[in-house]
Amino acid sequence: MKYWNEKMECMGAEDMRALQGERLRNIVRYTYERVEFYRRRMDEAGVSPDDIQTIDDIVKLPFMQKKDLRDYYPTGMFAAPMDEIVRFHASSGTTGKPIVAAYTASDLDDWAEGVARCLTAYGVTKDDVAQISYGYGLFTGGLGAHDGATKVGCSVLPTSSGNTAKQIMLMRDLGSTVLCCTPSYALYLAESIEQDKDTDVARDIKLRIGVFGAEPWTEGMRKALEENLHIKAYDIYGLTEVSGPGVGGECECQDGTHIWEDLFYPEIIDPVTLQPVEDGKEGELVFTTLSKEGMPVIRYRTRDLTHLTRGRCKCGRTAVRMAKILGRSDDMLIIRGVNVFPSQVESVIMQMPEFTGQYFITLDRVNNIDTFDIDVELKLEYHSDSIKNINAIKAKLNAKLVSVLGIKPDVHIVEPGSIERSMGKAKHVLDKRNFK
Ligand code: ADP
Ligand code: ZN
């Protein structure tokens, strides 16, 4: 099967905009009538549900942010009564209160639909054994991928994250063909398979497709995962506030992540002026949920930075495509006045086969100057090299980092295995400046 939902994935632009307009009208009225927050915000902005007729009218509506969702913790943003809510999730939010999301049965169905469209676009079918190594629980990754794979009819292996030795045993013994997890956990799994004397990737592992998301990852990471696991690695994107993974996914062309825009309407804005940004130009991604009942969002600012491309993709889909996300504006580090994304560091390290791909950035401030240290793991076989050779590898890395980042870090070569592995979303940065 080529498409999960050909009608929605390949709809002509005009029909899609008409459908989006109709759904926007409904969701605006629905939230205005049911949620105090939307009523107040729209009243303050001087816009009423009657002013929203077509999808172009969306620009009249106010934006909302994570802080609004936090302020209304725990249930203030729910638009459906509790007896219609069938599931909660929460974002991992490291500081303060989490964002709690609520889903009706129909929301779960739409969410699984989004994931099923992604899986089908990657080439997953009911004949696949799908190992879900995203964490199960409040995090949307595990259950989101689970419900989508179940909808497609896969044989689902719900291992959740962690317990890597057992993951590999089951992967081998049940012949998993699809692996769903964060790219950083996939890298760790690949490394663990390589170290497992009883398991040979080519002989024992049947994986063919990787479904990776929940954190930014680079083309270099894709290449490493594809080579190490003998798979094709695809991007899946989503966020708890909008539903979870499966807001969009790549197709076999891997020319951007298709967003299921009949369900999740994307806009790109300039994060400073809040004005719309034209297609092809980078800005902040904003979402309006067009069908959600439990906790809809309207013009929700994700902080994710990307750009959009419209027009029919070679795969036949018309669903708008988004470029790979470099990072969230909150992930951006300002070091000695220069903007740096951890994913830029990753892109450089992944180009050099001498390294395992694991890295850790530490920032501090000494005598009022930012310090910028990066630990990188040199593969075992290079540690036996002469000091001269290791220094040459380090110099090469340094030169590449300076040219990409525009700032010179202090690189420290460390032993393989010394940087803590992640089972879920990787933590790549310790910013000690925050504690000062
Ligand atoms: P939290 O906000 O606690 O991290 P979520 O799981 O809801 O919880 O995180 C969603 C965020 O994860 C997105 O806004 C985005 O920044 C990031 N993300 C998810 N999927 C991808 C992806 N495929 N590529 C890059 N970033 C992603
Ligand atoms: Zn496509």
Image: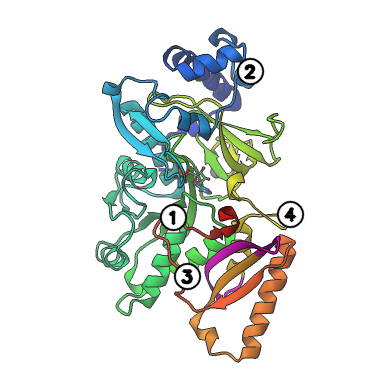
Q: Which badge, 2 or 3, is on the more N-terminal residue?
A: 2
The disc label shown at residue 61, or none: none
Residue 48 inside the magenta-drawn segment: no
Relative image position of residue 12 (x, y in whole percent): 57, 27
Find out if the beta carbon at label 2 lies less than 8 Å from the nearest ligand 1 atom: no
Q: Amino acid under label 1?
A: Thr
Q: Is residue 166 left or right of residue 299?
A: left
Q: Kindly check if marks 4 and 1 are in contact, taking CB atoms under 8 A apart as contact.
A: no
Q: Earlier in the sequence, mark 4 or mark 2?
A: 2
Determine the CA span between mark 3 and mark 1.
17 Å
Q: Position of residue 50 (x, y in %)?
A: 56, 7
> On screen, 347 above or below 280?
below
Q: Nearer the viewer, residue 256 or 359?
A: 359
Query: Which quadrant would residue 49 be assigned to in this image?
Result: top right
Name the amino acid, label 4: Gly
Separation of marks 2 and 1 at Cα, in angstroms: 37 Å
User: Residue placed at 32% from the left, 80% from the top?
Assistant: 197
Q: In which quadrant is the C terminus drawn? A: bottom right
Tag nearer the camera, 4 or 2: 4
- Residue for badge 4: 337
Q: Which numbered circle lies on residue 419? A: 3
Q: Pointer 2: what residue?
A: 60
Query: Which image quadrant is residue 1 in?
Result: top left
The secondary structure type at the circle numbered 3 is loop
Mark 4 vs mark 1: give the one in front: 4
Q: Secondary structure at mark 4?
A: loop
Precedes in sequence: disc 3 or disc 1: 1
Q: Which residues are magenta?
A: 352-371
Q: Residues within 10 Å of mark 3 (few under 14, many from 20)?
A: some
Task: Identify the disc placed on residue 182.
Answer: 1
- Count residues near mark 2 (Cα–Cα under 10 Å), then give few for <14, some for 14-19, many for 20+: some
Side (left or right) of 263 relative to 329:
left
